[in-house]
Amino acid sequence: DSGVTQTPKHLITATGQRVTLRCSPRSGDLSVYWYQQSLDQGLQFLIQYYNGEERAKGNILERFSAQQFPDLHSELNLSSLELGDSALYFCASSVTGTALNTEAFFGQGTRLTVV
Amino acid sequence: KNEVEQSPQNLTAQEGEFITINCSYSVGISALHWLQQHPGGGIVSLFMLSSGKKKHGRLIATINIQEKHSSLHITASHPRDSAVYICAVRYYGGSQGNLIFGKGTKLSVKP
């Protein structure tokens, strides 16, 4: 158990809908990272938050947004969903915000299926 | 273009064999990670390297900064090692937290 909790584990929704994925980092970790793993693109970095503020952005679509709350949990919001958004979404956390040069701890992922 | 190449893509081994998975990258990096993804989908971080060699149980990871190459070795492989092994790097100048991932090596260890 990495100590990073993601909910829900599975999510099935229709095209055009909006969903929210939740991540609770390990106790004491200030940084949260979101990644998308699709069959054709593999794993891709989406966005990082550190202590409530956006720190870095990767290949995140404009339809997607994220935030980190004062208790350090994070939510990834996906809207106007398309079939191609079906993927595994991972969250990881680390102690520092100065990039993932420290050890990363991954959650179990949320499997999103858009039908 | 910053790329991470892994080889082989697929690997089948007999229990007890010594296994090597390779990872090459194109420009200078600040860190390289080896990750293990189980059939259920969960990801476990195995190693983070910036130089030299690290060992944990039957797993050994090495990195050659000059050659831009890393290897993950598994000694005395076991069916429970069956998983996808993913190499990921953070390039110098990349935004913080922005890991570039290889496509993974799918390992199957037969009893």
Image (cartoon, coloured by chain):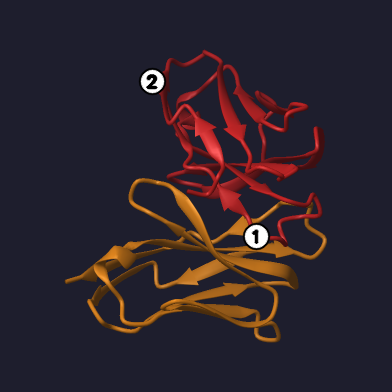
Chain colours: A red, B orange
Q: Quick check: can you spot residue B77?
A: yes
Residue B24, located in which quarter of the rendered image? bottom right
Q: SS at mark 1?
A: loop
Residue at image coords 65%, 60%: A103
| Image quadrant where residue A86 sits | top left
Q: Where is residue B27 in the image (x, y as percent from the top left)?
A: 72, 72
The answer to which of A113 and A23 lies nearer the viewer is A23
- In screen coordinates, is A83 left or right of A4? left
Count of picture labels:
2
Judging from the image, mark 2 belongs to the subunit labelled A
Task: Tell me the quarter of the picture where residue A113 sits.
Answer: top left
**On screen, residue A99 above or below B9:** above
Residue at 60% x, 65% y: name it: B33
Which of pointers 2 and 1 indicates the residue nearer the eye?
A: 1
In the foreground, B43 or B95: B43
Q: Name the residue under label 1.
A: A103
Residue pointed to by mark 2: A115
Please determine whether, in this image, residue A59 is positioned above or below residue A11: below
How far apart are the alpha carbons under marks 2 and 1?
Answer: 36 Å
* Amino acid type at mark 1: Glu
Q: Position of residue A97 (x, y in %)?
A: 79, 49
Label 2: which secondary element: loop
- Where residue A95 appears, x then y in whole percent? 73, 51
